[in-house]
Amino acid sequence: MEVEQPGPLQVENRIMLTGSDDLNWQDRACAVLGLLAGLHCVLASLVSSSPRWLSGERAHLLFAVLSLAPSMVAVVRGWFIHHSSRVWAYAIPAWAAICVARSGAQIQMDEVSETVLTIFASLLLVVTHQLNRSLAYWHDRY
């Protein structure tokens, strides 16, 4: 009698997590950068006396570039490994939300909306990179 092995998406009915041999540091770093961008946005909006270098437009541009550029590289790199289009369903809205939040002043978005959109985008980046890590890790193991 042959026992059916679980597929790559059904790893013993558990959430797809990576093993201890996962060496994918890019997706981890991108998730942290996304969280730092969200944290910066929250802190800059909550602290009214924050220094100009922390809450100025250049700081926002720096965090947007630091979270977008490496994220794009990591997602494309992971996609070449796993070829799953699911990661794009999370990555593209996250990147678009960061761009819209960054250009909030030009489209007359209020500060609260920019902050909420940035937090949403940063959390979506974390999900994107965890999915990308998991798909790249499990693609050839089953």
Image (spheres, rainbow, N blue to C red):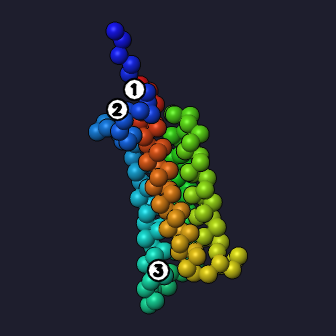
Residue 12 marker: 2
- Rendered view: 16 above or below 47: above
Q: Is residue 53 visible?
A: no
Quadrant position of residue 102: bottom right
Task: Read off the residue under disc 3.
Answer: 44
Instruction: Tell me how many marks there are.
Output: 3
Q: Quadrant of the N terminus?
A: top left
Disc ID at residue 6: 1
The numbered mark, 2 or 3, whose residue comes first in the sequence reads 2
Mark seen at residue 117: none
Q: Looking at the picture, which amino acid does disc 2 mark?
A: Glu
Side (left or right) of 100 relative to 124:
right
**Secondary structure beneath disc 3?**
helix
Q: Position of residue 129 (x, y in %)?
A: 47, 49
- Of residues 134 and 70, the one nearer the viewer is 134
Q: Position of residue 62 (x, y in %)?
A: 53, 68
